[in-house]
Amino acid sequence: MNKLLQRFVAPVTALLALGSAAQAKAPQTARPALWAVSDPDTTIYLFGTIHLLPSNLKWRTAKLDQAMTSSQELVVETVIDEKNPAKLMSAMASLGLAKGLPPLVERVPPAKRPALQAAIKKSGVPEKAYNGMKSWMAAFLLLSSQFKDLGLSGGVEGVLRGDFIARNKPIGELETNLEQLSYFDRLPEKAQRNLLEGAIENNNSMKQEFGSMLDAWTRGDVKGIARTFDRDLATSPDLRDSLIRQRNANWTKWIERRMGQPGAVFIAVGAGHLAGPYSVVEALKKSGYKVQRVE
């Protein structure tokens, strides 16, 4: 569950966890997967990302840079404004705060309450404030504290955005901040509490899980990424349907509409959305599009 939480909330917690410390152990170079779907006048590149990375990892390749250079626009999951987080914080508060909720510590099994209380104390946010948060929002904030210990930077999306901004190219999003957060807000309470429990797993466990995920990504091992998602989601049908299948279906429709316009677009989304039987890549193939692995 911890890995699921890392993958899906990291676009938001990347902002919340700024100021990281020790570096997570990682390879020095990477060759992440890249696809292209095209017709005679349109090319859409599909790049699977990890939202948070060790700052010393070199992941840009010649083929990736060529795809970026040839694209007129970058499209990401959602645009996080790191310089002005008010929009994100407002969206989170509008969905994630509520009255009459049970105390946060009562939302996890008794055996896990000491770990939750320790995580709350470590976060620096008063426990009373957490009691007014829905379980998914509390999980977000607690996970951001965990990310600081892993020493992770803003990851791939920030670099891509900087590159396209420098070239005066537009940046679009598949979901607004509010839309992305609403997927978590609609989860049943049981699924939200699963996320909460995942956010308080011990740091050593998180480091091992992140290392495994990062290893598959750096090698462009799409099957390996899919296996970890399948294993984690097998016991979490609500998370699978809301955070994977629904979003992938929406993004596939967006791509199909965009194929009707000429030009080249570079789409960067979490790597798990491009791996496995329910991926955007497989959905496009089923719709009759030719999707080519570029790298």
Image (spheres, rainbow, N blue to C red):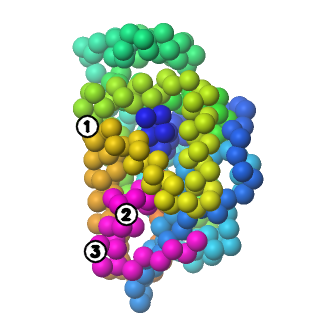
Q: Is residue 223 above or below residue 257?
A: above
Crowding at mark 2 (Cα within 10 Å: few <14, some 14-19, many 20+): many
Which residue is at the front of the view, 125 or 280? 280
Q: Position of residue 295 (x, y in %)?
A: 58, 71
Q: Give amino acid for label 3.
A: Ser
Q: Position of residue 272 (x, y in %)?
A: 45, 53
Q: Position of residue 206 (x, y in %)?
A: 57, 32
Q: Please indicate, yes or no, whether residue 244 appears anywhere in the rendered image.
A: yes
Q: Please indicate, yes or no, whether residue 131 appears anywhere in the rendered image.
A: no
Q: Quadrant of residue 182?
A: top left
Circle 2 is placed at which residue position?
280
Left/right of residue 70 with respect to residue 196 in the rendered view: right
Q: Give amino acid for label 1.
A: Arg
Circle 3 is placed at which residue position?
287
Q: Position of residue 84 (x, y in %)?
A: 53, 40
Circle 1 is placed at which residue position?
186
Labels 3, 1: front one = 3
* Residue at (63, 46) in percent of width and height: 53
* Residue at (68, 73) in percent of width and height: 62
- Magenta extent: 271-295
* Residue at (55, 75) in percent of width and height: 294
